[in-house]
Image: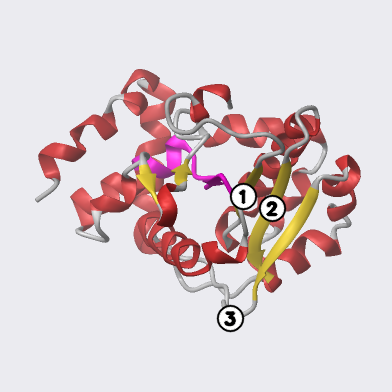
Amino acid sequence: MKRSFSGRTKLGKNPIITVYIPADRILEGFSLAYVLAKIEKKFGGVVSVMTSREVLKVIKERELDKRLEEYKNVRYSVLEKVVESVECYTIKSLEKSLKNIKENVVLVEDTQAVLLPYTLTDLNEAFLEHVILGVGNLKVLKTEEYLANRIPLILPYARVDRADVIALSHVLKFVELLDAEPILPKTNCRINEIIKDLVLQVALKHPELTHTMLKSIEFFSP
């Protein structure tokens, strides 16, 4: 977490940090908000969970909102006009998340940073979806982007495999969010399964490549 903020922003006293939780990354987003709330409790920081009412309902139905609020420094910024669905393509999920954040970041007054819960695995999937299938825009893979008023957009999991985040959820005992996606509207996503399997195989057989793959972005960018 410290590395994520280093060189990007200097948090002031009692900072407000926003965590955006998209519909198809509920487990990752909740894990991030929970860990951040625990850390910021020591520094008087506030964690603002920005998400849709549908996602918030998933969290509350599992009574995990009580776990999140136990540090008493969490608040919610609910996106009322967002109708959630699970995207087939990771790169499309990123595009939608960025759009929602840019249109609604004003909801979180005085926020000093916005965090997105996409992992290294997600970024590699998105990269290959664009290169192999021609889906999406590579610009969404920039991990050093700034929003209005120079608010940094940070991906703390950008160097962390999805499997490690899932392992963390087991340790923290809210792995039940793994089955959250099916209760949200979802279309047939078989077409991108080959990409997900390819990234998985690379992670298992050549894990060093998962950290170098994204360095090819500039070559493929127009």
Where residue 85 sits: x, y (%)? 54, 72
Where residue 37 sits: x, y (%)? 75, 39
Residue at 42% x, 66% y: name it.
Answer: 99
Q: Which colour scheme is used?
A: secondary structure
Secondary structure under tag 3 reads: loop
Under mark 3, the amino acid is Lys
Are the residues tagged 2 and 3 within 8 Å (C-beta)?
no
Of tags 2 and 3, which is closer to the observer? 2
Residue at 57% x, 59% y: name it.
Answer: 22
Q: Which mark, residue 19?
A: 1
Q: In this view, does 128 lie above or below 8?
A: below
Residue 112 left/right relative to 179: left
Under mark 2, the amino acid is Ser
Secondary structure under tag 1 reads: strand
Are the residues tagged 2 and 1 within 8 Å (C-beta)?
yes
Q: Which of the image's four quarters has the N terminus? A: top right
Q: Which mark, residue 137?
A: none
Q: Is residue 101 above or below residue 129?
A: below
Of tags 2 and 1, which is closer to the observer? 2
Residue at 44% x, 38% y: name it.
Answer: 121
Local crowd size for mark 2, using a 10 Å CA cut-off: few (<14), some (14–19), many (≥20): many
Dot 3 or dot 1, earlier in sequence: 1
Residues at marks 2 and 1, CA–CA distance in whole angstroms: 6 Å
Residues at marks 3 and 1, CA–CA distance in whole angstroms: 18 Å
Under mark 1, the amino acid is Val
Secondary structure under tag 2 reads: strand
Please give the residue where the numbered disc 2 appears in the rendered image.
48
Residue 116 highlighted magenta (yes or no): yes
Q: Is residue 94 above or below residue 106?
A: above
Please give the residue where the numbered disc 3 appears in the rendered image.
81
Q: What stretch is highlighted in magenta?
A: 111-124
Camera-nearest residue between 197 and 66: 66
